[in-house]
C-alpha cells in the first residue's frame, strides 16, 4: 500500500477509535506524554488547610456558573455564603435619560475646559446611588461544636467538592452540582441539634456611623437599597426565604434537609422570579432526600468535572506556578458555563459582609471581563468561554440603543461598565462610556472563531458584531489637519484617573490599537466569507488611520506627544503587543519597540501596580519570548497578590513592597490573566503560526491538548531542554503552520522528514479533518 494511502487509512482508524471514546479530542493516549495521562489536577493542587477561613473573601469557593458558594467560619458557626449570577438590582440613575447624555456634549465641555458638570451628571451617580448592583443571596449557618478545631479543610479540585474534617470526628462534604441549580451538603457524626439556619443579607439594618460615600473597593451598606423586610417561612425540615427587591424583581432561597443516624443531609437553591434569558435550568431533583440521591447527584457532578479536566493539562517544574494555574482553571470552570452570565468582577462569589460588593460586582468591560476570558481559548475551554460572547450577543439590542442615544451613530458600541442586561452604569466615563469598548469585546468574537473555525459562528455572529463596530467607528471618527482619521475624544484606561486630563485630543495608542486591529480583523473575516466589497471598504478605512505613536527611543507612547512618566496599574498603551498582537516579535522593527516599551515599564517600577498588572506583564514577556521574566512576574502575582484561597485581591498582601496598593478588594481578572500567562509561555498561535514552548525558562515541561488558532489540539513534551514529541489533532482540517520545534532533522508520523520546511523556518502541512499528526526528533 502506498505510504500516503496507508497514512490516510491509519488516520481514519484512529478517528473511528476516538469517536467511540467519550473524550474524542483527548484520547491521544499512546501518542502523548505519559506524565499527563489523566489530565486531572492532583492533590498538590488542592486547597487544603488546617484552619477554617474567617473572612468571606478567603472562603472555599464552589460554583457552576449560575450559583456559587463560599464556605468559611463566622464567629462560632460554619457559614456557606450563597450567590446566584443573575441576582441584580438593575435600576439605573435618571441622569442617563437627560439630553446631556451625549458624547458630543461631553466633548464640548472638555473643549471648554468645563468638566465639573460632566462629572456631576455621569460620574457621581455611580457613587451616589447604591444601584445598579449585583446582589448577594443569603447564607446558611451550622453551629458545629468546637467549630475551630479542624483536622483538615479545603477543596478537592478534581471533583469540585469541599471536605472539612473536625477533630471530633464530624465531617462535612459539600458541592454545587455541575449542571443543576442546587448546592448539597452532608454532615456526618453530628447530633440532631445541628440543623441549618438561614442568615439573610442585612437589607433592612443600617449600622450606626454608616457613611454612604463610596461604592469603590470598600463598598457600602446593603441597607441603602431600601428593600422591604423579607418573608421567611420555616417548617420542620425546610426554610424558604423570599426577598422583594426593586422594580418587581424578587428571589427565593430554599433550604431543605433530613436527619438520620448522626447524618444531616440537605440541599439548597436560589431562584429569582426573572431568570437570565439564556439559562436552561436543568432540575431533576424533585425526589425526596436520601443518601442514595446524594450519592447519585455527586456521581453525575463528578462526571462533569472529570470531563472538564480531561480537556487539557499542563506540567511545569515550578510548583507555585503550576498550583496557581490549576486553581485558576478550577475557578474558571466554576464561574463560567454556557447559558449562564459571564464572569463579573467577583462572578458568583459576591461579598458577604453586609455591604455592596466591590465596585458593585459589575461588568467592567474596560479590562476585567476581557482579561477573564483570555485563558479559555488555549486551555481548550471554548464552551465555557462562549458564555461571554453569548451574553454580548444577547445584549446587542441594548448596546445598539445605547450607541444611538449616546454616540448618535449607527453600528455598535457597548458600555464599559454595564449591568447584567447591558445597560450603562456610569462611573469614570472616559472608560465606562469609552468609545472603543466594543472593539475590545470584538476581540473575543474573533478568538472564539479563530480557535474553533466555526463557520456558522463566523457568519452569524462574529463578523456581524465586528462589522457593526466598524460601521460605528467609521461614523464617529473625524479628520485631522493631515486628513487622517481620529476620535473626537480619546482615553487610555486609567491614565490620569477621572480628571479632564484623562481625555486626549489625539487618539491614544489604546484606542488606536483597537481600531487598527478591528479593521484588520474585519478584512480577514470578510475575506473568509468572500465579501469583496466589504474587504475593500475595511482596507480603505484602515489605511486612513495613523500608525501607532512611538517615541524617538522606539517605545510606545500613551498618545502622540504624551509619554507614560510614572508607575501605573494599566498597560493600556501596550495593547498592540498583547493581547492584540499587532506588533510581532519576529519583525525586527517591531521587536525594537517591544523591547524598549518593556524596559520602560521596568524603569517606571511597580509602585502603583495591582495584581493584574503582574499577570498582564507575564503575558507581555511571554510574547517577547522572555520566559525568565514571564515566570518572575507571574510568581510575584501568586505570592503577593492572592489570598490563601487563591483569590486575587488587587493590593500587595506580602508586605514586601511590590506595590504601594495594599488594599484587598477581590476581583477575578488577575487570576485568569495569570492562567493566560502560563499558557502563553507553553503555546502561542497568534497570526496563524503555532509556536511550541516559546517562552519557558525550564528544561522540562509538557502539556496535553492545548488548543491553537486553526482548531488544532496540541500536545508536547520537553525533556532536558529538548522537545521530544509534538502531537497535533486537526479538528477542522486546513493548513497547519508551525515554527520548527526541533532541529532540521525530524520525522512526521514516523516517516523521514518531508520537504515541508519553507524559507522562514516553518513546517507547513495541509491537514484533513480529524487527522492526527506526530512530529518527533
Image: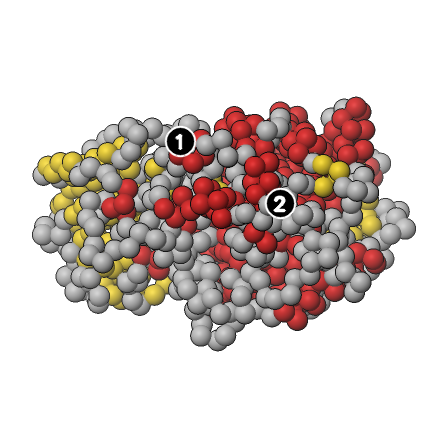
Looking at the rendered structure, the number of numbered marks drawn on it comes to 2
CA neighbours of label 2 inside 10 A, class few (<14), some (14 to 19), many (20+): some
Q: Position of residue 625 (x, y in %)?
A: 71, 61
Q: Secondary structure at mark 2?
A: helix
3D distance between C-alphas at marks 1 and 2: 42 Å
Q: Nearer the viewer, mark 1 or mark 2?
A: 2
* Residue 61 locus on image (x, y percent): 36, 52
Number of the label disc, if any, that sits on residue 111: 2
User: Is any part of residue 353 visible from this angle?
Assistant: no
Relative image position of residue 324 (x, y in whole percent): 49, 60
Q: Is residue 401 above or below residue 425?
A: above
Location of residue 562 by image quarter: bottom right
Other-residue count near label 1 (Cα within 10 Å), few / some / many at <14 / 14–19 / ≥20: some
Numbered badge on residue 6: none
Question: Helix, strand or loop at disc 1?
Answer: loop
Viewer-closest of 402 and 458: 402
- Residue 629 lies, with reference to residue 479, above or below; the image says below
Identified at 69% across, 67% down, the residue is: 600
Q: Is residue 761 left or right of residue 426?
A: right
Residue at coordinates 16% horizontally, 65% vertically from top-left?
Answer: 146
Q: Which residue is mark 1?
A: 276
| Marks 1,2: beta carbons within 8 A | no
Determine the residue positioned at 45% across, 41% down: 121
Colour setup of the view: secondary structure
Q: Is residue 24 left or right of residue 95?
A: right
**Residue 210: image x %, image y %?**
25, 55
On-image quarter of the C terminus:
bottom right
Amino acid at each position: 500500500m502506498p505510504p500516503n494511502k496507508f497514512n490516510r487509512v491509519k488516520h481514519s482508524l484512529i478517528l473511528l477509535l476516538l469517536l467511540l471514546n467519550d473524550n474524542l479530542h483527548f484520547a491521544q493516549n499512546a501518542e502523548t506524554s505519559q506524565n499527563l495521562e489523566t489530565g486531572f489536577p492532583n492533590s498538590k493542587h488542592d486547597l487544603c488547610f488546617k484552619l477554617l477561613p474567617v473572612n468571606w473573601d478567603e472562603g472555599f469557593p464552589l460554583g457552576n456558573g449560575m450559583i456559587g458558594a463560599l464556605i468559611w467560619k463566622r464567629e462560632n458557626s460554619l457559614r456557606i455564603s450563597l450567590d446566584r449570577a443573575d441576582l441584580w438590582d438593575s435600576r439605573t440613575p435618571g441622569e442617563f435619560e437627560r439630553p446631556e447624555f451625549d458624547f458630543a456634549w461631553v466633548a464640548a465641555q472638555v473643549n471648554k475646559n468645563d468638566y465639573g458638570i460632566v462629572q456631576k451628571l455621569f460620574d457621581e451617580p455611580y457613587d451616589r446611588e447604591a444601584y445598579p448592583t449585583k446582589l448577594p443571596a443569603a447564607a446558611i449557618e451550622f453551629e458545629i461544636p468546637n467549630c475551630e478545631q479542624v483536622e483538615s479543610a479545603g477543596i478537592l479540585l478534581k471533583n469540585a467538592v469541599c471536605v472539612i474534617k473536625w477533630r471530633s470526628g464530624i465531617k462535612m462534604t459539600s458541592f454545587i452540582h455541575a449542571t443543576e441549580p442546587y448546592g448539597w451538603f452532608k454532615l456526618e457524626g453530628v447530633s440532631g441539634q445541628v440543623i441549618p439556619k438561614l442568615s439573610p443579607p442585612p437589607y433592612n439594618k443600617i449600622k450606626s456611623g454608616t457613611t454612604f460615600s463610596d461604592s469603590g473597593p470598600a463598598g457600602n451598606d446593603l441597607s441603602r437599597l431600601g428593600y422591604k423586610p423579607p418573608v421567611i417561612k420555616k417548617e420542620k425540615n425546610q426554610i424558604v426565604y423570599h426577598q422583594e427587591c426593586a422594580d418587581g424583581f424578587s428571589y427565593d432561597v430554599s433550604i431543605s434537609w433530613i436527619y438520620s443516624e448522626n447524618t444531616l443531609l440537605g440541599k439548597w437553591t436560589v431562584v429569582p422570579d426573572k431568570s437570565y434569558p439564556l439559562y436552561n435550568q436543568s432540575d431533576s431533583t424533585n425526589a425526596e432526600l436520601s443518601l442514595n440521591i446524594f450519592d447519585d447527584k455527586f456521581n453525575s457532578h463528578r462526571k462533569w468535572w472529570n470531563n472538564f479536566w480531561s480537556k487539557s493539562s499542563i506540567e511545569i517544574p515550578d510548583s507555585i506556578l503550576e498550583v496557581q494555574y490549576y486553581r485558576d482553571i478550577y475557578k474558571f470552570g466554576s464561574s463560567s458555563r454556557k447559558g449562564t452570565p459571564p464572569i463579573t468582577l467577583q462572578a458568583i462569589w459576591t461579598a458577604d459582609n453586609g455591604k455592596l460588593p466591590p465596585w458593585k460586582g459589575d461588568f467592567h468591560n474596560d479590562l476585567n471581563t476581557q482579561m477573564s476570558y483570555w485563558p479559555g481559548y488555549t486551555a481548550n475551554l471554548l464552551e465555557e468561554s462562549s458564555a461571554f460572547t453569548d451574553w454580548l450577543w444577547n445584549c446587542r439590542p441594548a448596546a445598539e440603543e445605547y450607541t444611538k442615544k449616546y454616540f448618535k451613530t449607527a453600528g455598535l458600541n457597548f458600555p464599559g461598565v454595564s449591568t447584567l442586561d447591558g445597560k450603562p452604569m456610569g462611573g469614570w466615563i472616559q472608560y465606562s462610556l469609552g468609545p472603543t469598548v466594543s472593539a475590545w469585546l470584538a476581540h473575543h468574537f474573533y478568538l472564539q472563531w479563530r480557535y474553533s473555525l466555526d463557520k456558522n459562528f463566523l457568519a452569524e455572529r462574529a463578523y456581524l458584531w465586528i462589522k457593526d463596530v466598524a460601521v460605528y467607528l467609521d461614523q464617529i471618527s473625524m479628520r485631522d489637519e493631515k486628513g487622517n482619521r481620529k476620535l473626537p475624544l480619546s482615553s487610555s484606561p486609567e491614565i490620569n484617573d477621572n480628571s479632564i486630563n484623562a481625555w486626549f485630543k489625539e487618539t491614544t495608542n489604546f484606542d488606536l490599537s483597537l481600531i487598527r486591529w478591528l479593521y484588520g480583523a474585519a478584512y480577514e473575516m470578510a475575506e473568509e466569507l468572500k465579501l469583496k466589497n466589504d474587504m475593500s471598504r475595511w482596507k480603505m478605512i484602515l489605511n486612513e488611520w495613523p500608525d501607532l505613536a512611538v517615541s524617538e527611543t522606539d517605545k510606545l507612547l500613551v498618545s502622540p506627544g504624551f509619554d507614560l512618566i510614572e508607575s501605573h496599574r494599566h498597560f493600556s498603551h501596550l495593547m498592540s503587543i498583547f493581547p492584540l498582537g499587532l506588533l510581532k516579535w519576529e519583525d525586527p522593527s517591531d521587536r525594537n519597540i517591544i523591547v524598549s516599551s518593556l524596559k520602560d515599564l521596568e524603569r517606571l517600577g511597580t509602585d502603583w501596580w495591582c495584581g493584574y498588572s503582574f499577570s498582564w506583564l507575564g503575558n507581555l514577556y511571554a510574547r517577547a519570548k522572555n520566559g525568565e521574566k514571564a515566570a518572575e512576574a507571574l510568581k510575584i502575582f501568586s505570592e503577593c497578590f492572592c489570598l490563601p484561597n487563591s483569590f486575587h485581591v488587587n493590593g500587595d498582601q506580602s508586605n514586601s513592597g511590590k506595590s504601594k496598593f495594599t488594599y484587598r478588594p477581590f476581583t477575578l481578572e488577575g487570576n485568569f490573566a495569570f492562567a493566560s500567562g502560563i499558557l502563553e509561555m507553553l503555546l502561542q498561535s497568534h497570526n496563524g503560526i503555532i509556536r511550541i514552548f516559546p517562552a519557558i525558562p525550564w528544561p522540562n515541561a509538557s502539556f496535553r491538548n492545548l488548543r491553537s488558532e486553526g482548531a488544532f489540539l496540541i500536545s508536547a513534551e520537553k525533556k532536558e531542554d529538548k522537545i521530544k514529541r509534538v502531537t497535533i489533532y486537526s479538528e477542522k482540517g486546513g493548513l497547519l503552520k508551525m515554527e520548527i520545534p526541533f532541529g532540521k532533522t525530524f520525522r512526521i508520523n514516523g516517516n523521514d522528514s518531508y520537504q515541508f520546511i519553507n524559507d522562514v523556518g516553518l513546517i507547513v502541512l495541509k491537514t484533513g479533518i480529524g487527522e492526527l499528526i506526530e512530529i518527533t526528533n
